[in-house]
Amino acid sequence: MKKFLSIVCVLAIAVSAFAQDGKKYEIKSGIVKTVTEVMGQKIEATAYFDNYGALEASKMNTNGMEICTINKEGKTYVVNYTMKNVQTVPQQAEINFLNLTEDVMKQYKIGMIGFEKVGERDCQKYTYEVSAMGQTVKSTAWVWKGIALKNVTEASGMTITMTVTEIQENAEIDPAVFEVPTF
């Protein structure tokens, strides 16, 4: 159980902490609903972003726990609403698919391996590696307008598949979504 939660948290940070200076997404704001499949379980999450990805929050319920990651101002806040605690960690991964520099491509072993549709959207397909919390995960991402519409990750002998089920482009986001609670 502890290993499962650790991997889910690493994945949440790795998938959602892709910010660098400048635009992260080609869309100003959005609400993105996903389903992540791992170890026979499906985890639904809702991600929110504003200001082209400068602000991000992702909420999920897993194993009876309500968890939210909030990315802003160079930090990731992992909020556990069930246990009523907040952990602050530096953002681990710094990949901006709209602005891939040679250094970033080398650091994360990023390779653009082609084009493929996810749903009706034409995506660029990338492979990459991220090290976070003492683990290295290998992933393949299908990226549209800077947003990973699908991500397949190999971690600790498991395959974790995240797929976007719905996107609301240029959605009006309540600023409270990005506030870090105090318990």
Image (cartoon, helix red, strand yellow):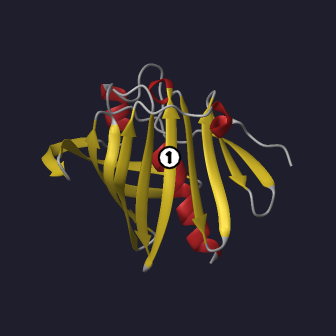
Residue 135: tell me if it is visible.
Answer: no
Direction from residue 76 to residue 139 in the image, left or right: left
Q: Residues within 10 Å of mark 1 (few under 14, many from 20)?
A: many
Direction from residue 183 to residue 125 in the image, left or right: left
The residue at 36%/45% (across/down) is: 167
| 136 and 140: which is toward the camera | 140
Direction from residue 69 to residue 106 in the image, left or right: left
The residue at 50%/31% (across/down) is: 172
Q: Quadrant of residue 81?
A: bottom right
Q: Position of residue 71 (x, y in %)?
A: 59, 37
Q: Quadrant of residue 159?
A: bottom left
| 7 and 67: which is toward the camera | 67
Q: What amino acid type is highlighted by mark number 1?
A: Ala
The residue at 30%/27% (across/down) is: 102
| 96 and 104: which is toward the camera | 96
Q: Position of residue 73 (x, y in %)?
A: 63, 27
| 173 and 106: which is toward the camera | 173
What is the quadrant of the N terminus in the image? bottom right
The residue pinned by badge 1 equals 47
Residue 96: tell me if it is visible.
Answer: yes
Q: Position of residue 19 (x, y in %)?
A: 48, 32
Q: Is residue 150 above or below residue 2?
A: above
Q: Position of residue 29 (x, y in %)?
A: 45, 30
Q: Furthest-right residue in view?
A: 183
Direction from residue 22 to residue 2 in the image, left or right: right
Q: Is residue 64 above or below residue 165?
A: below
Q: Is residue 61 above or below residue 2?
A: above
